[in-house]
Image (cartoon, helix red, strand yellow):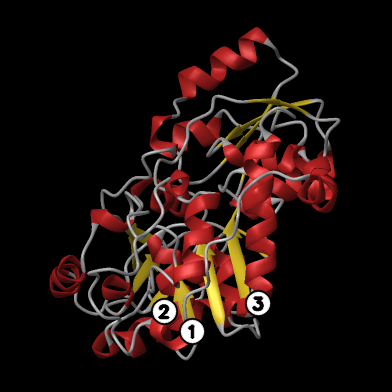
Amino acid sequence: MQDRVLTGGTAPLNPASAAARFGIIERPDLTFTPEIARETAHLYERVKDFIPAIEWPVFAPYVHAINRIKKERGAVILAHNYQTPEIFHCVADIKGDSLQLARDATRVDAEIIIQCGVHFMAETSKLLNPDKTVLIPDGRAGCSLSESITGADVRALKARYPGVPVVTYVNTSADVKAETDICCTSSNAVAVVESLASDTVLCIPDEYLAMNVANQTKKKILTWKGHCEVHERFTAAELLAYKEADPRIEIVAHPECHPSVLEVSDYAGSTSGMIDYVKTKRPGRVLLVTECSMASNIQAEVPEVDFVKPCNLCPHMKRITLPKILDSLLYMTEEVTVDPAIADRARLAVERMVNLKH
């Protein structure tokens, strides 16, 4: 990774920028030393089954520097379950699915939040923490679901279906959330839909999540053709082939998959639900029908479980790396902001979700 050039001809810092407000920290020496080896040994124990010993000297200096500098900055690192093990187990302070991170973001005391996830998650953290500085290590970390719909699309839907409440998956931009009655995640989508008085509900933008919700409610669910590029790749035929090869395998699927996938699964639930299922049931062999890194992150806590990994990776989540997290801390980049004209309305939709009792 190339070091950033911050002097000698660069444009002056914007006085309102995070770097101007908090200052820039000098880049540390990233040499792997015996001292770093000792101070990170306990962290390597968490990931030794996934990171070969020969590779740890590359990761350890970054882990060491990030954990030191985040304390100096007074920063907290939030990491989604789809982050790689060296991030999830070695530098993250708060870990979870999108709903858990949304809730926990409101409880942090830190002035700086580093969001190790995709952009809509960082926006959500900013909506719930408008007075805090929210950074994402790579602003290009997007989401196929978020990019499948715009605020203008939602306004058009509302004109087409006047009076029908809009439930929007949290995997969306603030512009979309601002046009929404209430947000939802995969773990609370059914509860959110059931909380509304209307017999008809727009459940957008994930078509498969909406179809799976429709199978669990008597309400009429109107959908949008948005899909997760990871979960839409799984097929029922693929999973049945795994079952045929080894009938002992338990299949645990995410509701962003097509309903036919859920039909052949042993359990279907949100990211947190999938994790709870594996930790509680401790199946001998399990196939998680979701992003590949989550299996590694769970396996670190339940080493006796044998995970079969189809390994569909989210290219957007994988944009977040240790070097980029370190850069984010050093140079206070990339700061996430939300247009004040839409922030209040978007925040209200998220807060309704977070505050929903279910």
Crowding at dot 1, Cα within 10 Å, few <14 / some 14-19 / many 20+, comes out as few
Secondary element under disc 2, as helix, strand or loop, is helix
Could you tell me residue 39's position as x and y percent?
82, 53
Which disc is residue 123 wearing? none
User: How many marks are shown on the rendered structure?
Assistant: 3
Secondary element under disc 3, as helix, strand or loop, is helix
For label 1, the residue is 22
Residue sitting at x 64%, y 8%? 245
Precedes in sequence: disc 2 or disc 3 = 2
Q: Amino acid at mark 3?
A: Glu
Residue sitting at x 32%, y 58%? 146
Q: Gap between marks 1 and 3, in whole Å?
A: 11 Å
Q: Amino acid at mark 2?
A: Ala
For label 2, the residue is 19
Could you tell me residue 288's position as x and y percent?
62, 34
Which of these two is toward me, 74 or 203?
74
Q: From this viewpoint, which residue is outermost toward the top?
A: 245
Which of these two is toward me, 19 or 356?
19
Could you tell me residue 240's position as x and y percent?
55, 17
Q: Indicate left or right for 114 with 145 as reference.
A: right
Residue sitting at x 50%, y 62%? 185
Which of these two is toward me, 314 or 152?
314
Location of the C terminus by quadrant is: bottom right
Residue sitting at x 36%, y 79%? 181
Q: Gap between marks 2 and 3, in whole Å?
A: 14 Å
For label 3, the residue is 72
Circles 1 and 3: CB distance less than 8 Å? no
Q: Image quadrant of residue 138?
A: bottom left
Question: In the displayed structure, would residue 55 be above or below residue 344?
Answer: above
Q: Amino acid at mark 1?
A: Phe
